[in-house]
Structures are given as structure tokens and as C-alpha cells.
Image (cartoon, rainbow, N blue to C red):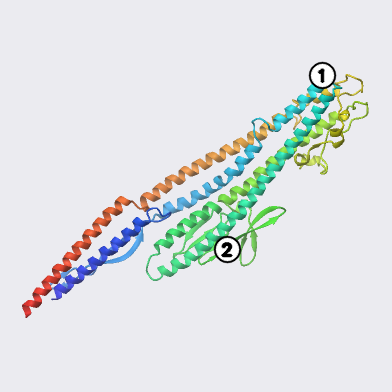
Amino acid sequence: MGGLLNALNAGKTSLFTNQKGIEVTGNNMANVNTAGYSRQVMQLSDIPSLEYGGLFIGTGVRVDDIVRNYDSFVQDQLVDKQATFGEADAKTTPMTEVERIINVTENNISTAVDSFFDAWQELATNPSGEVERQVVIQNGQSLASSFTEASSQLQYAQENINTVLEANVVNINSALEEIADLNDRIAGIEATGLTANGERDRRDLLVQDVAKSLGASYLEQKDGTVSLQLPGGLPLVQGREYMPLKTERINGSVQVSLVTKASDIPLSIKDLGGEVKGLMSVRDEFIPDLLGDLDKLAYNIIESVNAVHTAGVDRDGNPAGVFFDSAPVPIPPETYGAGSASVMQVNAALAADTSLVSAGKSGLSGDNSNALDMVTLHEAPIIDGADSFNGFYSKIAGKVGITVNQNELTLTGAEDALTQLQNLRDSKSGVSIEEEMLSLVQYQSGFEAAAKFLTTVDEMMDTVINLKR
């Protein structure tokens, strides 16, 4: 009877193991479309053999653990590439908006410059003409509006980035909190000798999300928890605790800080990566650089046009005033007129009285000398002694186009790398329905065989019992 009892136990363990295999396979199939899910497999071992009748006979099988197919190298690469992708992807939308504002097509600042000096050319052919004077004023107003509108739209783009940063920080804090909670659960589960497969899959996905948002890196500890830190080395998650981010408005701009127990640490671009770094670099570096170039161009136009205009006289022979002014903000020349583009406007008195337009220098009828001098400004190398107004604007637009194209190339490369890595992960850790169907058939056959085995052992035991009667 001892041998039959051992055989009965072996059949029981086989039945249990194959049933568990069917459950694991079913779970895999159910999660075939679950993002970040890793295929789970059973780890089996035979139960130690027992000596019986001078022979060692196996006593069945046991499930040691249920583990996930996981490649730490692929996960490391995914986290690293997510940071690169996140930074380039975050730049795309605001840079596209900037490219629309600083465009090289029709109806841009360059077109307005051409129209303004073309109007002076027309005035030179008829210095006393009322219509020609009015057109000069109108085109001056259009040129000023082009600058103020471009400056306003660039500042609006910066404000949009501020809004996106505030929303991103809320999502990041939620992810950091969940990672800390998962650390706690994983450490607790695995302290009992089990493996927290589902929790680890979810945490891996969140780590990738935080890497995409902040460029964070991670390190797994011996207790199964992970530590996250910013590119600059500041900690985000340590075991069961996390350090949240916070935003506050300083001079109208959103400042991101890391909240620690000791104090709040303001974060700069060098401390960050991913989407937040991309957004801040566009807001704090790319757009201010463009605004500075626009101010420089506006300042040079204002100063050059005013210098020529005040050298002449109005239609009544009186000394002419400035054509453009920058009220209410004075233009500091040492900064190439910081803020010039945002406040550029035609002199209010001149805008209301066409006789104040200076076409000549003598006040005599038909004198067009000043208008001709104004026309020569159009193509003169005024800016830094090298560029005309339109030439300098073309450089601004060209710089925007090059930067946008470079970012698109970086984004495309990061997308391709992520796709390849995700495909590699899927091949190693993803669920294949065909493979699971084969496993299902295998475990089903094993279950049926174990059941048949138990039936046979049961019949043998009945026979032995009946013999003793």
C-alpha cells in the first residue's frame, strides 16, 4: 500500500501543477493587450525521491514559483531612450508654433518691411501726394503691428508652456507616489518568498513614464524596491518614500522645485531631462533668444528710420519729428533695444496728420530727397554692419527652421529606437497567443493524464483492499 500511496500523491501533485499551469496560461492570454505586462511562467521541480524496496522512487512535482519573462537590459535601454524621446517630443508642439510665428512665407515681418519701404519709394515719386503719405503711415503701422504681434505670440507660447508644465507636474507626482506604494507592496510580498509579478510590471511602466517626463534613472535595491533620481542626482523615490515636485509662479514664469524634508530645491534645466527639460529649454532659451533677435531688428529699424526722418522737414517746412516711437517703454540702446518689438508704434501725432511725414529736406514742393534717403535704408547693411533688415530676419527664420529640423531628426531617431526596443521586449516578455494555446494544450493533456493516472491508482487500491477481504 505504501507504493500506491506514494503514486497517489504523485498523481495529486501532477493534477495540481497542470491545473495551476492552465490558470497561469489563462492569465497570460487575458493580459495579451495589457500595456507593460510580462508573460508569466511556472518554475517546477521534482519532489525529492523516497527509498522504497531498495529503489529511489519519485514522489511528484511541485511549483517553486511563478516568474515573469523579464530582461533588465531591455528595461534599462527603454528607460534611457524614453528620456531622449520625451525631451524631443515635448519640444515639437511649441517649436512648431514658433515656426509658424517666425515664418518665411507671405505675410511675415519681412513682407511688412518690403511694403514699408515700397511706400516710401512711391512717396519719392510724388512727395506732396496725400494718398502716398497716408500709405506710408499705414504701412508703418502694419510693420509695427507685425513686430508687436510676433512678440506677443512668442510670449503667449511661453505661457502655454507654463500651463503644460503645471499639468505635467501633477501627473509626475501621481506616478512617483504610486511607485513608492508599489515599492512597499513588492518588498512586503517578496519578503515572504513570493514574486510580485504584476506589481513589478506596473512599476516598470511607471518608471518609463517618469523617465519620459523627467529623464529620471533608476536603481533596483536588494529588497526589491527601486530608487529614482533626476539627471542631476537629486532623489525622487527612495524605498517607500518619494519627493514630490511643486510649481510656483515667479515673475510670471513657472518655477519647478523638488520638495524635500529639509527644504524646497529649485530645479534648473541642468537638473532635469525628458519632457520637462524640453519644455523649459524652449521657454527659457529658444524663445528668449528669438525675442532678443526681434528686439534687435525692431530697434535698428526704429533708430535708422527715425534718424533719416528727423533729418528732413514736414510738408510745411518745419523740422520733422520721429516716425516711430516706443512709448510707453524707453529703449535702452546698450541692450539693442530689449522690448523694442513689443512696444513699436508709429508716432501718434504723425499718424493723425499726414503733413508731418518728411519727404524732403528743404520744404520746397517736389523735394523728395528725404524719401530717397529712406529708400536706401531698405537694402543697407545696417545691422552689425553686415545685414540688411530682411537679411537679418532671414537669419532669424533660418535659425528657427534649422532648430526645428534638428529636433525632428532627434525625435525620429528616438522613436525608431523605442520601437525597436519595444519589439525586442515583446519578443522576450510579451504574450504570444499561439504559444499560449500550445501551452494550454500541453497542460490540458497533462491534467487529463494525471486524472487517468489517479483513476488507475484508485482501481489498484480497490483491488488490493478486496484481496485482503
| Relative depth, front residue between 285 and 146 | 146
Going 49% across and 41% down the picture, which residue do you hit?
413
Residue placed farthest to the bottom in the image? 469
| 217, above or below 1, in the image | above
Query: Picture coordinates of residue 340 (x, y %)?
Result: 77, 40
Type of amino acid under label 1: Thr
The residue mark sitting in front, 1 or 2, is: 1
Q: Using the image, determine if residue 23 lies above or below residue 361.
A: below
Residue beneath the point at 14% across and 70% down: 457
SS at mark 2? loop
Q: Residues within 10 Å of mark 1 (few under 14, many from 20)?
A: some
- Give the number of the disc on residue 125: 1
For the N terminus, the image quarter is: bottom left
Alpha carbon distance from label 1 to label 2: 71 Å
Q: Are marks 1 and 2 in contact (CB under 8 Å)?
A: no
* Callout 2 amino acid: Met
Up the image or down, 124 lies above or below 138; here it is above
Q: Residues within 10 Å of mark 2 (few under 14, many from 20)?
A: many
When asked about the image quadrant of residue 34, the answer is: bottom left
Residue shown at 26%/65% (left/top)?
17
Q: Which mark is residue 243?
A: 2
Q: Is residue 147 left or right of residue 76?
A: right
Q: Is residue 253 above or below residue 222?
A: above
Helix, strand or loop under label 1: helix
